[in-house]
Image (cartoon, rainbow, N blue to C red):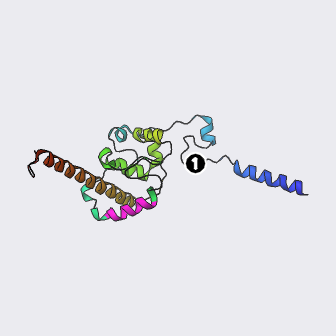
Amino acid sequence: MKPALLIAVAIVFTTACNTGRNNSAWSEKPPATPATTAAPSTPVPAPATAISSGKGVGPVDHVDMAALDESKEEAGAKLFQEKCSACHKLGERYVGPALAGVTQRRQPEWILNMILNPENMIQNDPTAKGLLATYIAPMANQHLTREEAECVLVYFREHDEEATEAEHDGDLEGEESSSGHAGSGR
């Protein structure tokens, strides 16, 4: 009786684990269905305007940076800590790239599309594909709303502006001390 029970359990587990479903959101190959077995599937390329514009691929095609209120920075910092910091640090490479200066390297639309739609970006955006090739681990979709993603963007922007100001202030101090003329900058 016991061997028959063990065989039955083994069959159930084998069948349950081999359902043919593709549970990976990052897989490039969709699960086999009658529609995809008849003809090989190819990824649908993104519209040329989305790629050539540097805005990425996804739901965001315009961001008015002036309209993003800096009061959202605190909420963005909290969201970054909760949702992003397992893979990203601002000033150092971790599982993913360092994010300090990201608002100077990428357009705001690209950043929001990557936050909101990482699967599509990795499939269709050349920059996102390059990041995947470099960092190996695909960016996980944290299912943020557009408003939450904008808070994270404000956090990045404010961090980058503060870093730029600090760097600029340091350059001015260096110029003043090397010239011996405080305040002249030369």
Q: Can residue 59 be seen in this view?
A: no
Q: Residue 18 location, x and y as percent?
A: 70, 47
- Camera-side residue: 35 or 77? 77
- Camera-side residue: 111 or 56? 111
Left or right of residue 20: residue 183: left
Q: Is the magenta stretch mostly helix, strand or loop?
A: helix
For label 1, the residue is 24
Amino acid at pointer 1: Ser
Residue at the extreme right of the image, as rendered? 1
Q: Quadrant of residue 126?
A: top left
**Residue pictured at 20% horizontal, 47% vertical:** 171
Left or right of residue 146: residue 176: left
Q: What is the quadrant of the C terminus in the image?
A: top left
**Residue pictured at 85% horizontal, 56% vertical:** 5
> In the picture shown, does residue 45 fall above or below 103?
above
Q: What stretch is highlighted in magenta?
A: 72-82
**Residue pictured at 36% horizontal, 47% vertical:** 110
Q: What is the quadrant of the N terminus in the image?
A: bottom right
Q: Residue 45 location, x and y as percent?
A: 44, 37
Q: Is residue 23 visible?
A: yes
